[in-house]
Amino acid sequence: MVRGASVGQEPPAAESAAATRLTFVVNDRPVSVQAHPARPLLDFLRDELDLTGAKLACDRRAECWACAVLVDGRVVAACVTPLAQVAGKRVTTIEGLGSPDALHPLQAAFVDAGAVQCGFCTPGMILAAKALLDQKSEPTRAEVAHAMRKHLCRCTGYVKIVDAVLLGAAALRGEEIGGGLAARAVGPAPGPRPAAVEGPVSVTTAVGRPVRSRDGVLRATGRHRFGGDLRRAGMLHAKILRSPHPHAEILGIDVSAARALPGVFAVLTAADIPGKNSAGFMGEDQPVLCADKVRYVGDPVAVVAATSEAVAEQALARIRVEYRPLEPLFNPFDALRPGAPRIHSGGNLFATRGLVRGNPAQGFREADVIVEQCYTTPYQEHAYLEPEAGLAYLDEEGRLTIATGTQNPHDDQRVVAALLGLPLDRVRIVNTESGGGFGGKVDTSVQGVLGLLVHRLGRPVRLAYTRAESFLATTKRHPFYLHYRMGATADGRLTALEAEIVVDKGAYASTGWSVIFRGVIHGTGPYEIPHVRVHCRGVYTNQSIGGALMGFGATQVAFAVESQLDLLAERLGLDPLDFRLRNAFRPGSTTATGQRLEGGVHIRECLEAVRPHYIRALVEARHARSLASQGHLRRGVGLACGWFGIGVSGFRHPGRRADAAAELTPEGRVRIYTGCAEMGQGSNTALAQIAAEAFGLPYEAVELVTGDTAQVPDAGATVASRGTYFSGHAVLQACERLRERLASRAGRLLEEDPGQVICEAGAFRSRLDPGQRVPLRELAAICRAEGIGLRAEGSLTSRVTDLDEETSQGIPYETYNYDTQLAEVEVNTETGDIRVLRLTAAFDAGRTIHPVKIAGQYEGGMTFGLGYALREGFEPGRTFSFTDYRLTRMDQMPEIVLINLDRPDPAGPFGAKGVGNLPANATAPAIAAAVRHATGVHLTAVPFTPDSLRRALVQI
Amino acid sequence: MYGFDYHAPQSLSEATALLAQHGAAAKPLAGGTDLILHLKERRLKPRHLVDLKRIPGLDHLTAEGSELRVGAVVPLRALERAIAGDELLQATVGAGLRQMKSPTLRNRATLGGVLANADVTADLLPPLLALGTTVALHGPGGDRVLPLDEFLLGASRTALGAGEILREVTIPRVAGGRGFFQRLGLKRVGGPPLVIVAGVLVPGPEGGVARASLVAGAVGPRPARLPQVEQILLAARPAVSGIEQAAAAGAGEAGAVSDLWATKEYRQEILEVLLRRGLQAALGTGGDR
């Protein structure tokens, strides 16, 4: 009998009796260690060897494979591999494959093919690809997808990952790749060429080019440190005690037993908060730690800091909270019932918003056909691969510093400063750049309690959410209940739309006000409708908090309005594409808010670009149906449109403005300061490209300082597709101001009119006489000596107007992007299974800044929409892991065909608009339309599970 | 820190004594592929683990004559090899085994462990039940043999008494039998099954069947025999003419339940589909898709 054997997250330390001597090789370096044989390899690599390229993201369940490493050339999940299993073997981590200066061909291929977005899954992906290619040098796409199917990615939609593996395979086989990997990765330019753009330069140096992103290189080599990868000497570990009740009063909290536990440094509750106990940056109803009441399962009640996570967990178990359970409300209709218990003191109605244009009663009188239907949409989880994590400490100036992945460093700073009652400049947020955000990292998560602990203790504290905690306690996409009534004339003109929408707000406000605003505005779809009335109520419930998620309200309403258009088209006997084309916005159209759309309105071109694919798909589907052998397999084709207003909804929010700065360095390079948050979407690369273009410099000559509130100006939250547009404008203006100032000085040096001085190849020169030039480095020295400023600020304050709550008339967004998506499906009528064969999309996101990254954004967004449509139903209290919540995997992906219109929008920086929130919106309704085409079933509830489709098939 | 005592008894009597002594605080350990996960996630917190793998006489596998006798700690991979040449066992047990995609898992997990675990979603239970498998138990009160059907009581519940150990599993070879295994699971790696159905049919005179044994799994709290389906098939001449009626009857009698993954109604409908496919395949109408 062996005494003291154990399992679990925290095997005994090396000195314990059960430790044994283990010898193995890590990245060609021999390692000999006294360790417990059951200790997970992942912990050893990360904590002892500081090899943090392998990530922990699924609570050690081998569900995501972000921890993958190679053991004797084979891929293993390091989170569930005991050290004993690698004894005598060779372990290879991403750090052993290549370095930023000497990329392995696969790493270069991942960067250039756009396979790296947030980069959290990338090390595991690259190692899995290496193992595959070592076995099979020329795999097919299907073989790659099959071999790597266990590896989750939430950003890319996997298309570019498969591209990268095939590209890397070609490079490893020694094939000549004309123009280098990057040129091969981009391929021939899709769609029509961009029209000439009015701007400072006519020939691009950076914009529109597939430059190699520097972030990508750091991520592909595992060198990028995310919040959870940071360590400091003497650091403590935090854990949060969360409410087990959906709705309860807190009668008392006794932390004495927890405080008495050896190794515990602090146990804090709401009573320990010196300032304003509010976690939200838009609403003030959400406490950082609950004082008198809990409002959902997962609400934080206390926080512990201890010498290890295990001790902190033991301390949590010793905290005694006395609750008095209250009646919980699990849907908005119960919460609206008269006499329902109040979740917040102001009642359960969180917010209302209306949109009124024309006279809907008259519009319905003019209609020949009216369709009316209810729709519902579920919670959706962001499921970024990086669970929330951060490290907080006092920096060298004694300033409270929190390093974490965030979409919103400056709002985080304001929340934490108010929480602690500190002046803003005593709180510093260092954005480590998220391993995926999608809207979920715009609210605070670890920030508040980390600030509280470090403020109290003065010692570094680390807090990393478990995956289960990330599911339980962070925001989700709001569920919507939508009742739609729409009318059209016999010749296919929309006459009226009426919609009553109820939004399940969950327990707290978060960004709900904006989501409701956007949902209402986008509720008409990108169509001219003369008579409109939309009314929306957001209602508190005792469920997960609804927040920002890609699409942001536009996703939910798109499902309803596009499904209604299909019903109308059918009643009218019109083709769904032609029917949409007849009503779609055109330049000069007026939206339901009364906004006249001028430039950059290309929804009609999107529809037309999809048309040939649509016709081809219809022919193929008809052919498939004519085959007798098909039996229970039915093909269908459907399409839908989406649109998205650029920028944060609403007038009063600080997100109306973005600031940036540009600086000429002594080396003659341009350095940009921006608070815009990189999270894999590529804003760092895009902003550097915009700066390079503004100066006429190559991308490589631009440096970027981002995310540290002590260094960079406030860009507002990086949400709502506003990064490229808002920060792009701010960067562009800062660069133009700096460039003008430098050109003026250079003009005097060159005895040339400043208007005739251009920047080229690292120097200002006369446009007329190329021999006359002054290098930027010399110019920097001259300006410095003469006291001429080498830094310029830029900003954009959007010209949106305030929209009243009853009718929402005004300008809610400066401009919009548009798309049309086409879905081809095969439905198994026996099992109700829907297989999406192909998704085709044409999109107008303005002019392209980076052709590979914009496509990657779009593919990833469509994959969000695909998962939303088919399988992602988050159920509060039942969904805690990637087993319960099914993300789309690599071998489940349909073929994706993209048509990027690449049309400049006169309002955007270099004509760019932004893309992030657009692609997820039209996917679900397009798939629903295709299922309807295949089976006749009109789906009204997302997601379309086999179960729900069978239910519907039985009923027709 | 959570810990436990590890015991490696060298004989059956030593093992039963340990289990009887510690009662609910002890858990027998075979392959551990399920138990260790429970320990890790603290769903189970036994103070004692009794490892059965060192006990002589629990790792035999004999495939002689009319039955297959499999020791409780024989890994599934060994069973897979032993049935390689047997068409009926391949179509039933083999098909169930192949659902466990990871070879590492098949090398580790044991047949006894799978049965004693009584996981309602286990792919092996329906085929073993359909074949008429029996289990031999050893306990403080001596040995006894039970049909598998009586051994499985419900979700994670078996007939094992205090201190009792599953010693051996006997899988009969059904002469001339034809079998099938059908399953619909969630579409992802290692996705749990929503419905499993397995069957063994012995052809009889006039195109009928002389014996029919059908079992549905993962639909309710325990795998269920489908007696109505069996009766319909036994009465049909030829048997294929009864397929539609049998499949329709099956949906109602499996005791389907709703859960996070599927509704009761969906399970019933899918059971009908899978029964039809399986019966068509086993009765040679080429309906297997």
Image: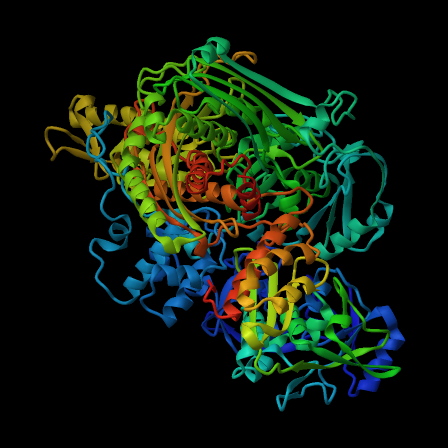
> x, y percentage for residue A292?
80, 31
Determine which quarter of the picture holds residue A487.
Answer: top left
> x, y percentage for residue A384?
53, 46
> x, y percentage for residue A564?
46, 27
Compared to A289, does B20 lie above or below? below
**With A935 as the anchor, is A411 left or right in this view?**
right
Determine which quarter of the picture holds residue B207.
Answer: bottom right
Q: Is residue A49 visible?
A: no
Compared to A112, does B42 lie above or below? below
> Which one is in front, A465 or B120?
B120
Compared to A287, does A127 lie above or below? below
> x, y percentage for residue B110?
66, 76
Compared to A794, does A121 lie above or below? below
Residue drawn 87% across and 76% down?
A: B20
Residue drawn 30% across and 66% down?
A: A172
In the picture, the quarter occupied by the N terminus of chain B is bottom right
**With A503 as the anchor, is A749 left or right in this view?**
left
